[in-house]
Image: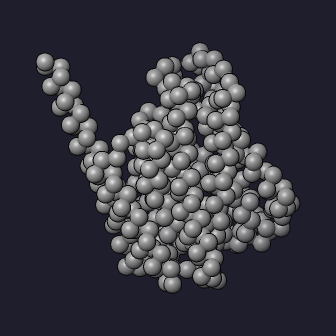
Amino acid sequence: MLVAFPVSSILFRLYYVNGGSHRWLLTWVGSAGWPLPAIILLLVYPVRGIAPTRPTWTLLLAYAVIGFLSAADNFMFAWSYAYLPASTSTLLASSSLAFTAIFAWLLVHKKLNASSVNSIAIMTAGAVILGLDSSSDRPPGTTSRQYLIGFVLDVAGSALHGLIFVLSELVFVKLLDRRVGSAVHLVLELQVVTSIFACLFTVVGVIASGDFGDMGGESQAFKHGPVAYYMVLVWASVSNQLGVLAGVAVLYLTSALFAGVLNAARVPLTAVAAVLCFGDNMSGFKVMSILLTIWSFGSYVYGGFVEEAAQQHKQNENDSL
């Protein structure tokens, strides 16, 4: 997550910076890398002597819902990267931690301690500060309306990202029982099937918009030529798929909340990379937002350690009785 997501964020923005303009195509790229985990899954079955999970209508419906939400999530981020600097888009995406915590509280009944609430408040303040910096943060040629659209879609996509994390955890807990069997094939199955559904939903938009047919002409007009054009799309798809796969693995082994924490932890790395790659303006507002994001991340992690220590102390007391 800490490597793959920053790479995909940079490549998505690189597509637009170098002349790309097809939103639906980039949305499709977000889920088109599903053959990669599928190949790994097909190798895992015989190597580990595991049979595929028997599908039920409930499980398939859950996969379809997550796939549809993933397609919508990719669509929102594809549009936001067209109008926002990569550093700003990534900083806003860190708000997924707050949404993950809220959805975990609503759907998984995960208690919100003082540190969690503090983390959400700080993260929200960081997003508000970025909004105040819109006048100096807009890329050349981007109108105020387009910047606002990108801003809103990025936050909405972050909310969906948090919901997807929590729903995936619910699938593991309620439908698959993550305490039984091998973690590897369950993680890969969820990733492959939901990505296939997301890809199918997205293909409809790509065909209707004519983006597939325009790829030849767009590749010729791409700043560094057709080879660079296709390499950007391929590696953006691969890195995004690996990032999502890592996120699913983390929430399987721990929780959706911890996956959200790691997702937020990548923000400073991506912001610095965006400044180095694209020369993004690092204003005082943006620096303050980065510091607030780090503070929010630290607050959540500290609260988790304190809560775990308290639970361990209570368990030790019970064992001694």
Q: Residue furthest top?
A: 49
- Position of residue 292 relative to residue 148, above or below, is above
Percent coordinates x, y for residue 37 in the rendering = 63, 36
Task: Left or right? Give the position of 245 relative to 146.
Answer: left
Please tell me which residue lies in front, 62 or 51.
Answer: 62
Percent coordinates x, y for residue 252 in the rendering = 48, 34
Q: Residue at x 38, y 57 (%)?
A: 120
Say whether residue 183 is visible: no
Q: Residue at x 41, y 35 (%)?
A: 254
Q: Which residue is drawn at 60% across and 24% down?
A: 44
Percent coordinates x, y for residue 42 in the rendering = 66, 26
Task: Left or right? Give the position of 170 relative to 68.
Answer: left
Q: What quarter of the picture does the C terminus occupy?
A: top left
Percent coordinates x, y for residue 127 in the rendering = 44, 68
Say whether residue 155 is visible: yes
The quadrant holding residue 272 is: bottom left
Task: Left or right? Give the position of 127 relative to 63.
Answer: left
- Image color mode: one colour
The number of numbered discs placed on residues in the rendered structure image is 0
